[in-house]
Image (cartoon, helix red, strand yellow):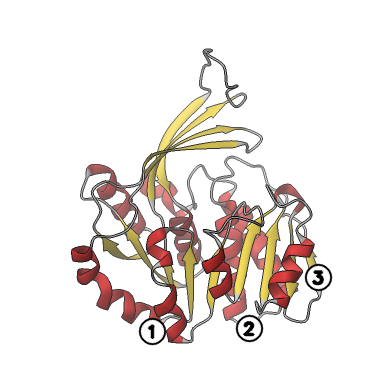
Amino acid sequence: MTANVFIAGPASWNRIVLLDRLPEPVPHMQFALAEHETVGGTSAGKALSLAGLGRRPVLYSLIGADPDGARVAAALRAAGVELVVGETPATERHLNLMTERGERVSLYLSSPGEASPESWRGTEASVGQAMAEASAIVLDLAPEAGRLIPAARATGRPIWTDIHDYDGASTFHRPFIDAADAVFMNADRIGDPLPFLRSLVDGGASLAVCTLGAEGAVGVDASGTVHRVAAVPVEVLDTNGAGDAFMAGVLDATLDGAELPEALEAGARSAARVLTTRHLHPSLDAVLG
């Protein structure tokens, strides 16, 4: 495998329920079209895609000593992800209500928060070593990843972050944005993303990218040049993890020296691979069925 990428953020155990439409906010009954359980979490998705691309991802995540946590850890390790596990009372769990059009409502059944001081003392050295050895550091939106920002910046390694459906105003996202060399997001709440992407580059980011679902993605490089890429046509089975796979593909290509147009194409190919599986990555098909 090629040089490692350090990732900090969520890994979860998810129940996915497929519906013909998202529930309306009124009392009613609906019948599910299908359901299954699988690994979730934005950081798990990135780690799985990077492993599939031949990288050696090291994922630091808070995972409970419970049956769901054991499932998450076993599946990730079987798929080639190296784990540094922080202790937490309960593994993060989601109930995702999905439609075949890719619409989603995520219900958080449990959330880990931050590691206890005792847990952090047990993992601090491993986390520090992994960051120091990494070719790049990915800090996903989570309190535990946020506490790593000063240490990540001190390594001098490029920092990548994914601010998801940022609305341009939330204060929680700001430390991640300010620390990052590369910022990724989607357009669910931002409207026209280009002004914001340009503001990120003007503010010091070397790369800012917004995914646009079936319309592909748009990115702004360090010179302020705008680049676009179309989505790769595939028969979509499940949209979970597509954005994470896209970012992983761009990161992998960038570490190999690709310029932004080529890296965006690599991201589109990576996203297409996970759209054809009901898991975060095809590597889990053999692990979870």
**Whole-percent x and y of residue 202?**
73, 77
Query: Which corner quadrant of the image does residue 25 belong to?
Result: top right
- Residue closest to the eye, 190 or 162: 190
The structure residue drawn at horizontal position 46% and vertical position 29%, both measured from the top left corner, is 35
- For badge 1, the amino acid type reads Ala
Please tell me the numbered disc located at residue 179: none
Report if the CB atoms under discs 2 and 1 are less than 8 Å apart.
no
Q: Amino acid at mark 2?
A: Gly
**Residue occupying image coordinates x 48% and y 59%:** 141
User: Which mark is in front, 2 or 1?
Assistant: 1
Residue position for label 3: 226
Q: Position of residue 283 (x, y in %)?
A: 45, 54
Q: Earlier in the sequence, mark 2 or mark 1?
A: 1
**Residue designated by label 1:** 132
Residue 285 is left or right of residue 124, and the answer is right
Kind of element beneath mark 1: helix
Q: Earlier in the sequence, mark 3 or mark 2?
A: 3
- Above or below, comparing residue 170 to residue 238 in the picture: below
What x and y, as percent, mark residue 31? 52, 17
- The secondary element bearing badge 2 is classed as loop
Above or below, 237 against 222 in this view is above
Q: Residue 65: x and y, percent? A: 20, 50
Query: Which residue position holds label 2?
Result: 257
